[in-house]
Image (tube, rainbow, N blue to C red):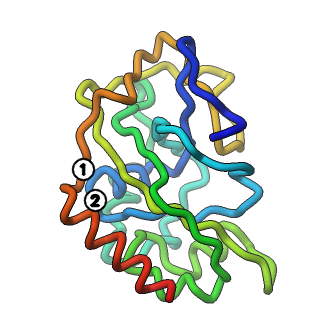
Amino acid sequence: MSDATTTAETVSALKERAGVVNALLDGAQTVLVRHPTLDPGTIDERFALYPAYSHQDPDRYQSRYEQYYHRSSAKPDDGVPIRAVADVREEYAVSSAALDALARHYVYTPDGLRDKYDPDEDGELRVLLLRVRELESPHLIEERGSYRGCRAWIDLEADADVDPEAATPVLDDATFAERRAAVRDALE
């Protein structure tokens, strides 16, 4: 992100619900829907995905994806698992009404997303098409006080030992290209 940079001492991480992070890792989800105030500026660097375990709501999930909530409903006792990095390949501004057309690209219901972000009637949401990569060496990291709280972006300390470049795409190039085209088609 232009406002949150990666340095030799830190790695930028996006906090997202643990069930959604698992869906991204499985390739079941390729987009994130965000409120524009959560991610000001341009997200132009690779970042870690930091699973958040609080404020998860099983009612927001589509019934076919409920397993993502159940697999991720409790934080592991031994640390927070950092298993993936991502980069934004495309970004769209959409109305709340467009969420119905995008429903096959994420695990929440359109109403679950509306409830989560509570957009104004005419307000836009931000849709980020992500290229997700699984880390070659996942890490369990200590949840520091500086990582807690209701904020979208955090900087992981160097001892988290996350190498954003040492990762393999969860979707092959052809599958990702198909998903990208499907997202574009859904938004036209």
Q: Position of residue 80 (x, y in %)?
A: 44, 30
Is residue 141 left or right of 147 when viewed as pictured?
A: left
Q: Position of residue 38 (x, y in %)?
A: 71, 53
Relative to residue 142, is residue 71 depicted above or below?
A: below
Name the disc covering residue 27, or none: 2
Quadrant of the image for the N terminus? top right
Residue type at mark 1: give it. Answer: Val
* Residue drawn at 60 percent across, 20 percent down: 144
Count of picture labels:
2
Indicate the position of residue 37 as horizontal and vertical percent values. 77, 57
Q: Would you say the residues marked 2 and 1 are in contact, meaning their CB atoms lie under 8 Å apart? A: yes
Which of the two residues, 70 or 168, is positioned nearer the viewer here? Answer: 168
CA neighbours of label 2 inside 10 A, class few (<14), some (14 to 19), many (20+): many
Side of 187 where 183 appears, left or right = left
Quadrant housing residue 96: bottom right
Amino acid type of the residue tagged 2 in the rendering: Gly
Residue at screen point 53% across, 43% down: 52
* Lower position in the chain sequence, tag 2 or tag 1: 2
In what element is the residue under mark 1?
loop
The CA span between labels 2 and 1 is: 6 Å
Q: What residue appears at the point 41 percent right and 76 percent down from the top-left corner?
A: 183
Which residue is tagged 1?
170
Where residue 143 appears, as percent x and y from the top left, is 54, 24
Q: Secondary structure at mark 2?
A: loop
Q: Which mark is residue 134?
A: none
Q: Is residue 123 above or below residue 7?
A: below
Left or right: 112 in relation to 38: left
Q: At x 41% / y 16%, what residue is drawn?
A: 161
Mark 1: few/some/many CA within 10 Å (<14, 14-19, 20+): some
